Structures are given as C-alpha cells and as structure tokens.
Image (tube, grey):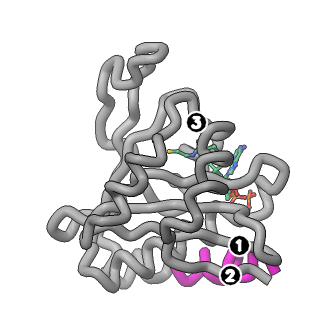
Amino acid sequence: MLSIKRMVRDDLDEIMELERVSFTNPWTRGMYLHELEKWEGCYLTARSDGRLVAYGGALLILDEAHVMTLAVLEDLRRRGLGARLLLELIRSAEGMGARFFTLEVRRSNRAAIELYARFGFQIMGERKHYYLDNMENALIMWTEDITTNEYRCILDDLWKRYGDAGH
Ligand SMILES: CC(C)(COP(=O)(O)OP(=O)(O)OC[C@H]1O[C@@H](n2cnc3c(N)ncnc32)[C@H](O)[C@@H]1OP(=O)(O)O)[C@@H](O)C(=O)NCCC(=O)NCCS
C-alpha cells in the first residue's frame, strides 16, 4: 500500500540516500531544508510499508508549477510510481493555484522525457550547457493549461492507468 504525504524534515535522511544515487548533481540536505520552508513549495514522498520509494516536488510561481525534482528507487522503476507521484503533485499544486507545469530535464534523460511526454509536457525550448558537470543542454518542457477539459481527459486516463501504482 502506497502512502503519499507531504515531505517533512524527518524524511531527509532517506531522501539524501535516494538523491545521491539518482542525480549527477544531488541536492544537499540544506537545499531541501530551504525548500521545505517555502510556502509556495509542494514536496511529496511516497512510502510503501514505511520505506521511502519515491519523492518529488514543485515550486509554484504565480500559476506556474516548476517541477524541481522527481525520483524513484532504482529497483522499483517502470512500475508506475513516478507517474503516480507526478499525478499527486499535479493534484496538490493545482489545489495551490497551478495552471501550468514546467520543468528542465537533461537532453539525455530519456526515461524522464518519456514520462513527462505521457503527461502532455511538450518541449518548448532548450538551455545550452545548463548542466555544468558535463555542459549538457536542458530541454524546457511545458504543459498546456491543466484546468482545460482536454487536459482533464489526459489526467483521467493517467489516473486510470497509474492511480493504483504501488498497491
Ligand atoms: C524518471 C523516473 C522518475 C521515472 O520513474 P518510474 O517510476 O520509473 O516511471 P513510471 O514507471 O511511472 O513510468 C511511466 C511512463 O514513463 C515512461 N518511462 C518511464 N521510464 C522510462 C524508460 N526508462 N524508458 C522509456 N520510457 C520510460 C513510460 O511511458 C512509462 O509508462 P509505461 O511503463 O506504462 O510504458 C525515474 O526513472 C528516476 O527516478 N530517474 C532518476 C531521477 C531522474 O532523472 N528524475 C527526473 C529529473 S527531471
């Protein structure tokens, strides 16, 4: 049974472990502490039998939710957990006033790009040499207005497919 909750300080030990193995430039504990203090932040964790299996977060700027992070335990990938967490993130951020979602993703990160494409994110631009560790470009992706009927249909289908992930 998957339990999705707001991220709190007590989650950070486990998050740091998953962060380190998931990202080339992992965030520090201090960066997460800073994010957790922001009222416009929406950070969630997913736990299965108490164990942290995924987390993600977005920051609201006016009506735009910027996806800041999303990670799933390596041995539990491709089971719908990333999609489930993103669905929950969209629901929570919409409740805070989000109408559009945007993010930056490494050009080579096929798994993430495919996931976001499933959610209707489209590539709208590219930042050259955005990632300083290897000078890789970032793709800038945006959703359409998530409050439209069209996007609601996309979300309904995604909830049907991934709403039970982790059960
Ligand atoms: C990106 C990430 C969060 C995806 O999580 P996940 O739980 O494996 O993804 P899901 O199982 O929910 O996948 C949902 C859909 O995304 C796409 N997808 C996910 N991983 C994919 C892969 N490796 N290759 C191709 N498509 C993929 C598929 O369309 C998939 O649907 P399907 O399995 O029903 O065909 C995970 O790979 C991860 O933690 N990566 C490391 C951290 C990272 O890069 N985060 C993104 C930062 S922008």
**Three-letter code for the amino acid on which mark 1 is drawn:** Arg
Residue at image coords 31%, 20%: 128
Q: Position of residue 39 (x, y in %)?
A: 25, 72
Task: Give the alpha-carbon distance from disc 1 to disc 3, as whole Å.
Answer: 20 Å
Q: Would you say the residues marked 1 and 3 are in contact, meaning their CB atoms lie under 8 Å apart? A: no
The structure residue drawn at horizontal position 51% and vertical position 63%, both measured from the top left corner, is 119
> How far across and how far down the image is residue 66, in percent?
32, 56
The secondary element bearing badge 1 is classed as strand
Query: Which residue carries the number 1 mark?
Result: 47
Disc 3 marks a residue whose amino acid type is: Phe
Front residue (pair 92, 159): 92
Residue 112 sits above or below residue 8 on the image: above
Label 2 – label 1 distance at C-alpha = 5 Å
Seen from the viewer's position, the closer of residues 135 and 48 is 48
Q: What's drawn in magenta, residue-wise? A: 155-167
- Label placed on residue 3: 2
The answer to whether residue 165 is magenta is: yes
Say which residue label 3 marks: 23
Residue type at mark 2 is Ser
